[in-house]
Image (tube, helix red, strand yellow):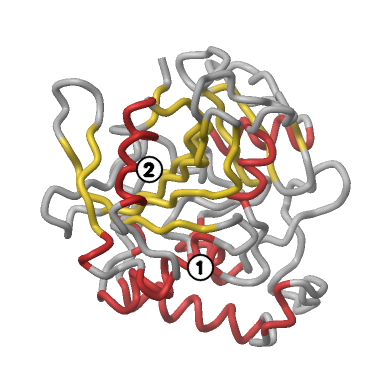
């Protein structure tokens, strides 16, 4: 089965259920130790500091095999354990390597275009492992990395984090874009907040009243997003998206895009985040974060 083939909604639920059972199915698993079930195992490419929790073997059809040759996955393996990618691929510049993730340059390379990638084999947003308590909180890791004072700060007036859907991405190793975002996007989101046009609880995220158009680059038109405001990123956004939007709406996780915009004022970071989700099931919706993020 090609890696880029869409995962059916029923398949995602089934695999997620299997993993939830393996992970002991309790809320305590979110902060407890990684399950010792043999299916969990460690990554085949343990990063410095020990192996991160990874998708179990039965999820390889949904989350990818460690033997895959995706270029970004090969870059991760080079940063994590020194495995040199085969020609003509060149060695990447490893900007940061931890047990849970590595940070690489995006394309084009500049000071406001970076990628955060799991050290485990995770093809992308369709992998049900990332919704489980065992998964690292990649979004919070991305924010802590990209913020002012972070280990790889995004040098731009406003920061945006984003992930594309399965169909919109080019490479099949999960990567969160850490890039700039237009001032007009920041202003629009604050305007919508003042109008009460966004959810303040995840359970209301999918409500039509919390959907609004946000403009992209000049000439690209508006796109419609479901908008949620959060005080922090301590909750797993993939889990919130699946439980509050995808599952109740009968949607496909593989089709979703997620964008995180830290709220900024003249005094600096306002200790809040706008979380935008969209897909092509929405009128004027999109499955890519590229309308809002600034890479060049």
Q: On residue 216, which mark appears?
A: none
Report the residue at 71% width, 24% height from top: 95
> Which percent across, then down, holds residue 280?
18, 53
Residue where numbered disc 2 is placed: 190
Give the residue displayed 64% in from the left and 56% down from the top: 137
Q: Secondary structure at mark 1?
A: helix
**Where is residue 115 shown, x and y percent of the image?**
56, 32
Q: Is any part of residue 77 visible from this angle?
A: yes
**Quadrant for the N terminus in the image:** bottom left
The residue at the point 30 percent across, 48 percent down is 192
- Residue furthest to the left in view is 283
Mark 2: few, some, or many residues within 10 Å (few <14, many ≥20)?
A: some
The residue under label 1 is 239
Viewer-proximal residue among 273 and 109: 273
Q: What is the x, y in percent for residue 64?
A: 51, 54
Q: Could you tell me if residue 71 is visible in this image?
A: no
Distance from Cα at disc 2 to Cα at disc 1? 25 Å
């Amino acid at each position: 089965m090609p890696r880029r083939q869409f995962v059916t909604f029923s398949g995602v639920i089934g695999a997620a259920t299997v993993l939830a059972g393996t992970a002991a199915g309790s809320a305590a698993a979110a902060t407890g130790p990684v399950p010792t079930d043999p299916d969990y195992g460690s990554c085949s490419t343990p990063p410095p500091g020990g192996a991160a929790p990874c998708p179990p073997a039965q999820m390889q059809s949904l989350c990818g095999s460690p033997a895959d040759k995706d270029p970004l996955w090969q870059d991760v393996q080079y940063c994590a354990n020194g495995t040199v990618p085969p020609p003509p691929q060149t060695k990447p510049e490893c900007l940061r390597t931890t047990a849970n993730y590595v940070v690489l340059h995006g394309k084009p390379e500049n000071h406001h275009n970076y990628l955060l990638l799991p050290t485990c084999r995770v093809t992308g947003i369709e992998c049900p492992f990332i919704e489980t308590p065992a998964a690292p909180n990649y979004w919070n890791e991305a924010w802590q990395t990209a913020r002012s004072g972070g280990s790889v700060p995004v040098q731009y007036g406003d920061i945006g984090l984003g992930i594309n859907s399965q169909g919109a991405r080019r490479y099949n190793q999960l990567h969160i874009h850490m890039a700039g975002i237009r001032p007009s996007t920041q202003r629009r989101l604050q305007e919508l907040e003042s109008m009460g046009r966004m959810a303040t609880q995840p359970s209301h995220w999918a409500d039509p009243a919390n959907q609004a158009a946000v403009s992209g680059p000049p000439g690209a038109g508006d796109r419609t997003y479901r908008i949620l405001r959060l005080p922090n990123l301590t909750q797993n956004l993939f889990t919130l998206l699946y439980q509050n939007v995808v599952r109740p709406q009968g949607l496909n996780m593989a089709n979703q895009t997620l964008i995180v915009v830290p709220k900024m004022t003249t005094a600096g970071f306002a200790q809040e985040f706008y979380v935008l989700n969209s897909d092509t099931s929405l009128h004027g919706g999109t499955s890519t974060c590229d309308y809002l993020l600034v890479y060049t």
